[in-house]
Image: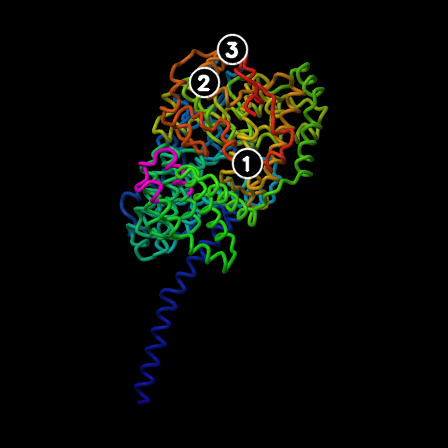
Amino acid sequence: MTTTATATKFHLKAFCHAILWGFIVPTCFMGAYLKFYLMDKYYGTHTSLVEDLYSEHSCIDNVPNRYLQQQQQQEQYSDDAADSYSSSSSSSNEEGAMNNGNVHRDASVTGVSEDIKGDNDDGDGDAYVPRTMTYITSSGRPECKSKQRGDGSHPRSQYYDKEVAELRNQVDMIIGVPETQQYHPQIIRQVTMTFVSLGNTLIIRDRLLNLGGIDVQEMLWAYDEALKRLEVAKEIGVVSATPIMEQLACTVHSNKAEAYYMADMFAKSADSFSNALEERGCTLEARAKARYLRGTALMIQGRYKESAADYVAALEEDYRDVHFYRILEKLTRILFANESDVPGGWEYLNGVLRKVLPDVLTSVSVSRKNEDLRALQLIHLCLFLYNDQKENDLETAILHLKESQRLKQSFVIHDVDQKSLRAIFQQQTGVFTAEFFERFRSKNLFGSPSQVPVFVIGFPRSGTTLLERVFDAHPDIAGLGEHSVMQNAGPGIVDTIRKNPFVNNSKYFKETAVELIAEMYDRWSHQMTSLHVNAKNVKRPKHLIDKQNMNFNMVGAIHTLFPHALIINVARNPMDVVFSNYKHDFLGKDASGDDQDYTCSFSGLSKFYKDFRLKMEYWDRVLPGRITHIRYEDIVNDLPGVARALIELMDLEWKDELLDFHKKKHAVNTYSATQVRKGIYKGAVNSWKKYETYLRPLKNELGGFAKWDVVTNIPNYTPSFSMNDEL
């Protein structure tokens, strides 16, 4: 017994040593080895990474042969690869790249080695704008060099800027290593995750700072590099051996889809979500989210039947996260557009609502968690829409709407801080005075005489999307969606003038104006790519529509940069527009990341609207006649007259397609998406009166602002009636 026990103990000890020295130590050593060289390279203490990194642990035998041929192909990004990320590239191919640090400015890649004359130049000063603000680094990584990234005031802005810079250094270092060395089974996961981390951090920063997808080319590049390594990992067996790697493939495709989404490239977004759903490692949670987001990308494109199929499939899987309840609200919008696109129509939706309501009520009574309150709030909103649209039961409908908004008030910031609004407004009025604009005019200090940008502003739900769609039907005009170039440039302009009011900042304004036009053409190019059109083969539009309702805050900054560009305010009956806001689900984030929605309470909504009106009155006072006001009611009652007057004002040739704008296939990412695809919809005029009895408190909150005497002031257009005629 003693001999046997001793032998067993000896063998067990030998086995443990074998495991320790044969697997655990080498694995830990490799992780430490990787981290050591990554950190040393990053801090500049190691200069021969290509020679040293992983040199003792080459896995040539594990790598498919075709990858052995790629070791020396990393020094410069190929033209084909560049086209997939920068479709606005110049078609010329110049010898010799101009280098600025580690940034290649080869015209064949970026089209910005010199100022390039615009296609629409007619001597009016628009001529020289770069084709793109995205350059290709020496490692092949696209990087947007735009300076318009906000004023740095966001509390986490510097943190994410630092994170992005560190990750860029790491991926640039990795790209410099021969690929065969990167594909070692014990290393490939860390390398892949570095690329994923870069893409993810860029997305988080974009959302946080509301950058509008400005770094999308770099995001897509990072995810493609990760997917390339995951493909190799599958072939050498790393993925099948590690469940987390299988899940990672699904995650990368989904994140790539979200990058396309935030850049308004919705067709490509839907395709990437489809790729995610095909991955074996796609969990139930990931599948539910991918179906929801793919359905939304399809709905934005007007592909309602496909969108509804995704939504219904997600509901049938019954994975009850927040996306499950948001799907219910999305389905109501498709039902409003075309009930036959949803199997079972309104009754199907009503059945789902009745099924899930008891469970949600129980969860709310037990936990009072925000996610449960959000779910119940969305259910009540859907029941409002069902009773309003399907049953025409106004009393039941308004009760559900009020309950929906009462619930939302319990978990969001919903009242406007008037002191903060007043302070922000006083900053603007202290800078943009009538005297300031006169001084700028007399000394010619403005940014650019370009008329390429057309800025469309107005209170949310006023009809700005409708006007943009009409414009976009003209072959010489392109709408750019919801992301405005002024969102990040505007605060910097105000700050520059405020700090140095007597300094000649003409150069700064001119450079900023040129850069913003380049960014607008970048976004147009992204749209062409999403439609599978190479922007190099299409004539550039003469006008680009920058539509962002909240730019009513930026009129002074817009005029400083583009004194000759159109600024159009779409004005709608005050009661119609505030009620339309109240009955829609707006949910955003404040600077601290907390949920906020000023439209879910009569008090917050009325203060928000009054702030808008006061600002519009101020701009009309210091810049008389500068803003072109267009009434929503004139657009829907006299589209031919309004459209002809606008096209004449823009000095373009009339096209009948403008009157059939709804027939053009185009992504529309707003609450108006399902309405504008129907064409002119007159049912929204005076829509508030249906609920007039219930809305008296809101009208009382507005006071004198419940009326607005603004009229359409397009030259050579006679408006049919004043704003107050409907009240």
Marks 3 and 1, the one that precedes in the sequence: 3
Marks 1 and 2, the one that precedes in the sequence: 2
Q: Is residue 238 above or below residue 522?
A: below
Label 3: few (<14), some or many (≥20) within 10 Å?
few
* Residue 123 badge: 3
Nearest the viewer among 415 and 62 is 415
Q: Residue at x 42, y 55 (%)?
A: 358
Q: Residue 220, percent across and down?
A: 41, 38
Label 2: few (<14), some or many (≥20) within 10 Å?
some
Q: Quadrant of residue 707?
A: top right
User: So how many labels did they put on this image?
Assistant: 3
Nearest the viewer among 665 and 230 is 665
* Residue 639 badge: 2
Q: Is residue 677 left or right of residue 564?
A: left
Residue type, label 1: Thr
- Mark 1 or mark 2, which is nearer to you? 1
Q: Residue 78, percent across and down?
A: 37, 32
Residue type, label 2: Leu
Quarter of the picture containing the C terminus is top right
Marks 2 and 3, the one that precedes in the sequence: 3
Evaluate if marks 3 and 1 touch, with contact meaning CB atoms under 8 Å apart. Answer: no
Asked which secondary structure carries label 3, the reply is loop
Q: Which residues are magenta?
A: 329-348
Residue type, label 3: Gly
* Residue 39 badge: none
- Label 2, label 3: how many angstroms apart (C-alpha)? 32 Å
From the image, tell me which residue sits under label 1.
Answer: 693
Q: Is residue 380 left or right of residue 347?
A: right
Q: Residue at x 66, y 36 (%)?
A: 421
Asked which secondary structure carries label 1, the reply is loop
- Label 3, label 1: how many angstroms apart (C-alpha)? 58 Å
